[in-house]
Image (cartoon, grey):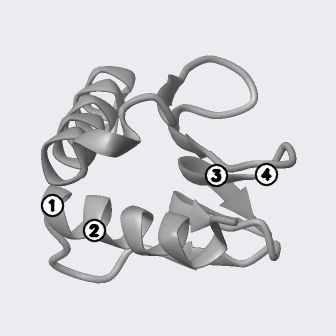
Amino acid sequence: MDAINHTMLVNRVLSSIKQQRPDLSEHVSHMSGSPAVGVKLQLSRDRSIMFAWVRDKSVVQWMIATPDQTLTPLRSGETVDDIASRLIEAFDRFAD
């Protein structure tokens, strides 16, 4: 996946989050550049949920990272709306 496709995926996930949960618009942002490209959902106390292109050992792939330091890879066949839903669920689980 090249940089243009990464950016398109990130923009589509951002849009899906805002469509599914307009109340999260002020919490969601686009991460670009180093160290990662992705989507960030900001929580309280400097914590966040991230969807990013990351390296885990020798594997580089899209993952969802949560404040409990869990890295979860995407599931086969997941759509943009599925990814957005998982990010929203994680946000709700970790929100104060």
**Which of the labelled discs sits on residue 81, or is there none?**
1
Q: Quick one: SS at disc 1?
A: helix
Residue at image x 63%, y 65%? 95
Secondary structure beneath dot 4 equals loop
Q: Earlier in the sequence, mark 4 or mark 3?
A: 4
* In the image, farthest residue toward the right: 45
Q: CB atoms at circles 1 and 2 under 8 Å apart?
A: yes
Q: Give the Cα distance between marks 1 and 2.
A: 6 Å
Q: Earlier in the sequence, mark 3 or mark 1?
A: 3
- For label 3, the SS is strand
Secondary structure of the residue carrying numbered label 2: helix
Marks 1 and 4 sit apart, C-alpha to C-alpha, by 23 Å
Q: Amino acid at mark 3?
A: Val
Give the camera-side residue of 6 and 24. 24
Looking at marks 4 and 2 on the same chain, the residue that comes earlier in the sequence is marked by 4
**Amino acid identity at mark 2:** Ser
State the separation of the CA atoms marked 3 and 1.
Answer: 20 Å
Left or right: where 62 falls relative to 46: left
Q: Nearer the viewer, residue 46 or 82?
A: 46
Quick check: marks 4 and 2 in contact, CB under 8 Å?
Answer: no
Q: Say which amino acid is labelled 4.
A: Arg
| Circle on res. 85 | 2
Q: Quote the CA–CA distance across marks 2 and 3.
A: 20 Å
| Amino acid found under the numbered disc labelled 1 | Asp
Q: Which residue is mark 4?
A: 47
Q: Residues within 10 Å of mark 1 (few under 14, many from 20)?
A: some
Direction from residue 91 to residue 16 in the image, left or right: left
Q: Residue at x 33, y 36 (%)?
A: 10
Residue linked to disc 3 = 54
